[in-house]
Image (spheres, rainbow, N blue to C red):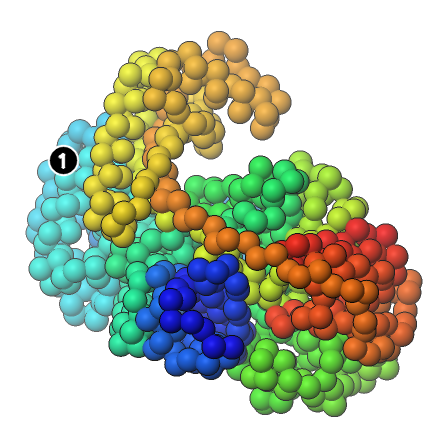
């Protein structure tokens, strides 16, 4: 199609482990999408490749497309993959004397209390590079021992001698008084200028020594790699003629200009999946509670959207490393189209968590992969069509899929290839169901009252089965589901979270004291967004406080109104505490542990496009397809997604082959295409 000269757009690119997804929304509201295989050795190349592909489809050059761009949003797994694979910089840690081993001791708590054999992840800083310095600040912020500068000099000498690439500074109680950390940072930065020194009181001025140290060290380890990647990408896009600001999607679901996050790559570890918040904004108009299941080539990300938004938590764990940063509440498992099936030494079939990735990819891609994956199983069972996929960037070869399953699974187990493929998908779907149960049933939420959203390139193939198994009665497969997160990035607001820890009795501090602390944080927030955000973006702020009963490990977060009183703060705390735990201490003392500000810069949603209505849909073919253990093999009508306009109604079973995903409907399912292209399925 030829785009008119006045046409402007917003662009989002989501770099995943298997595919790089592109979504463009024009000023006319029309959406254009593309997918290409990711380039693990240089993810920025995948970004440039997918821009070239879509620009060609729009009959223009990539430079012309970038010149028309008013906003470019990017989400990437670069930080995540670097942390998970241990490809981080050599870090030196300056810490308080007597506490150099806290990073290795951790909290003493296991993620799974019943599993005492699972090893901890490697400590990112060896003990020889965890250098203690004398000097002490107490919990109230008072200096009780002067900083010994000679210890800092000794630490710098060790770092220089040992080839340290990035320095982390984390001293005891620096959240209460950062003076010692600032002095250490000033000395260190004489040798490591700029962003290659990470200081905990600047990054996460929070209570909790271990989590603060872990976060600071991870950030220091990521700064060189992620900073280089972001710089390379920004340079390439600028050279290509990018006309608008380049924004990065953070773990909190909001965006921020790239310059503001280069020194804080720890904020990007959930970049990509965090777009679920923006992606669900268009799907919650009826007030339904949604459980989203976004299945790509490498992983499955599950989240719950309540009242139109996905909750944000104040910390997350990635690869066993605790990060004290705000993040969208997403549960992720290694289960996707490229998830590898294998047989262990005892003869049992396993599916995941390892994946084939973009290189070489599933066996059927014909790019050198020999391990059978879920995509190979779908192809063998007729759910996917052999031939070109993802805009012709890959070719699905059924003979390669059959050979991989036969050699690695079917023959060792004495099964037919079809039986082995069924086993692979059955086991994979058990993992998917448990992932949804983790974030719903295990947290007191009933999935039977929710609408399931099946997104991602592989979501539509599993959505009907998983939703039915959980008791959901309604399923939605969004329009352009295969680029769900990229589209969500375009609907994600600018966001800045600013917080600090403070410990004291609520009655002693009073509402006036709490509001004074929040006013200080608001001033800090205003200064940051004034320096970081594009001009002309109006910010709205909300305040919160973290409260607990004395002696408790975890705090409860409550919203704070500028007109709050001490009584109203206590009441809000008790109401939330009772909702979570079922009781309160009516006359118990309440402590405050922290305050924070969330600033949002609203991004208006692009105008919705209403599809033309369609006549009775006509299938493009009928194909033999395995549905489920009850229905078995069936002759199933196959529809082209591009032929389905608003109001099109399908009775299951059916297969819909869309541009970015394939949807499988079961017997008795009834699907209707909504006005905006979302497929709404009433499950049998």
Nearest to the observer: residue 621 or residue 19 = 621
Q: Residues within 10 Å of mark 1 (few under 14, many from 20)?
A: few
Residue where numbered disc 1 is placed: 145
x 37%, y 14%: residue: 565
Image point (78%, 80%), residue name: 380
Q: Is residue 134 above or below residue 369?
A: above
Left or right: where 576 falls relative to 6 = right
User: Residue most toward the top?
Assistant: 587
Residue placed most toward the observer, 49 or 261 = 49
Q: Residue at x 35, y 36 (%)?
A: 540
- Tell me: residue 324, above or below residue 505: below
Tell me if I can see residue 665 in this picture.
Answer: no
The percent coordinates of residue 625 (x first, y second) are 84, 74
Residue 549 locus on image (x, y percent): 45, 21
Closer-to-camera residue (128/255) = 255
Q: Does dot 1 land on a helix, a strand or a loop?
A: strand
- Counting the numbered discs, the total is 1
Horizontally, is 174 left or right of 486 in the view?
A: left
Q: Is residue 112 left or right of residue 663?
A: left
Viewer can see residue 631: yes
Asked which quadrant contains residue 599, the reply is top left
x, y percentage for residue 576? 53, 24
User: As displayed, is residue 550 above or below residue 536?
Assistant: above
Residue 201 as seen in the image, left or right of residue 134? right
């Amino acid at each position: 199609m030829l785009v008119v000269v006045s046409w402007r757009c917003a662009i989002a690119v989501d770099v995943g482990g298997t595919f790089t997804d592109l979504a463009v929304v024009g000023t006319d509201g029309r959406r254009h999408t593309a997918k290409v295989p990711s380039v693990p050795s240089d993810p920025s190349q995948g970004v440039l490749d997918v821009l070239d592909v879509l620009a060609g489809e729009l009959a223009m050059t990539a430079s012309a497309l970038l010149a028309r761009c008013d906003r470019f949003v990017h989400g990437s797994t670069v930080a995540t993959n670097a942390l998970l694979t241990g490809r981080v910089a050599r870090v030196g840690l300056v810490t308080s004397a007597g506490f150099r081993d806290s990073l290795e001791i951790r909290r003493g708590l296991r993620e799974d209390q019943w599993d005492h054999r699972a090893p901890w992840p490697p400590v990112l800083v060896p003990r020889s590079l965890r250098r203690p310095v004398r000097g002490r600040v107490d919990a109230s912020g008072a200096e009780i021992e002067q900083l010994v500068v000679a210890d800092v000099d000794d630490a710098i000498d060790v770092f220089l001698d040992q080839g340290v690439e990035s320095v982390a500074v984390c001293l005891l109680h620096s959240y209460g008084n950062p003076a010692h950390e600032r002095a250490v940072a000033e000395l260190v930065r004489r040798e490591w200028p700029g962003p290659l020194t990470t200081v905990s009181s600047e990054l996460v001025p929070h209570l909790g020594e271990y989590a603060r140290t872990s976060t600071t060290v991870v950030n220091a380890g990521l700064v060189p790699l992620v900073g280089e990647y972001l710089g390379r990408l920004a340079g390439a896009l600028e050279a290509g003629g990018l006309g608008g600001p380049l924004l990065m999607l953070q773990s909190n679901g909001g965006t921020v200009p790239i310059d503001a996050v280069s020194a804080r790559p720890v904020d990007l570890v959930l970049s990509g999946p965090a777009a679920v918040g923006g992606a669900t904004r268009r799907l919650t108009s009826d007030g339904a509670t949604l459980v989203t299941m976004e299945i790509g080539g490498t992983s499955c990300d599950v989240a719950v959207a309540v009242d139109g938004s996905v909750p944000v938590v104040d910390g997350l764990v990635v690869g066993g490393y605790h990060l004290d940063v705000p993040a969208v509440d997403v549960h992720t498992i290694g289960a996707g189209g490229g998830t590898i099936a294998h047989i262990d030494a005892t003869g049992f079939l396993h599916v995941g968590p390892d994946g084939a990735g973009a290189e070489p990819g599933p066996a059927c891609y014909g790019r050198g992969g020999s391990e059978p994956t879920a995509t190979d199983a779908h192809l063998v069972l007729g759910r996917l069509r052999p031939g070109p996929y993802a805009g012709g960037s890959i070719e699905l070869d059924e003979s390669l899929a059959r050979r991989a399953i036969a050699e690695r699974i079917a023959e060792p187990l004495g099964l037919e290839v079809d039986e082995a493929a069924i086993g692979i998908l059955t086991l994979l779907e058990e993992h998917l169901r448990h992932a949804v149960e983790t974030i719903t049933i295990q947290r007191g939420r009933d999935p039977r009252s929710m609408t399931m959203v099946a997104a991602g390139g592989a979501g539509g193939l599993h959505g009907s089965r998983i939703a039915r198994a959980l008791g959901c009665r309604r399923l939605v497969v969004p329009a352009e589901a295969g680029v769900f997160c990229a589209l969500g990035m375009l609907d994600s607001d600018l966001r800045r979270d600013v917080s600090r820890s403070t410990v004291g009795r609520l009655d002693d501090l009073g509402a006036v004291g709490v509001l004074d602390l929040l006013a200080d944080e608001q001033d800090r927030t205003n200064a940051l967004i004034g320096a970081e955000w594009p001009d002309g973006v109006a910010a709205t702020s909300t305040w919160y406080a973290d409260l607990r009963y004395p002696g408790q490990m975890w705090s409860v977060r409550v919203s704070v109104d500028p007109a709050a009183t001490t009584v109203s703060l206590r009441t809000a705390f008790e109401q939330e505490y009772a909702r979570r735990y079922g009781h309160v201490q009516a006359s118990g003392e309440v402590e405050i542990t922290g305050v924070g500000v969330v600033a949002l810069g609203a991004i208006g949603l692009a105008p919705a496009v209403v599809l033309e209505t369609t006549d009775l849909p006509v299938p493009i073919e009928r194909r033999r397809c395995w549905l489920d253990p009850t229905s078995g093999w069936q002759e199933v009508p196959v529809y082209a997604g591009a032929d389905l306009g608003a109001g099109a109604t399908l009775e299951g079973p059916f297969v819909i082959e869309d541009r970015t995903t394939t949807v499988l409907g079961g017997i008795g399912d009834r699907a209707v295409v909504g006005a905006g292209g979302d497929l709404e399925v009433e499950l049998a």
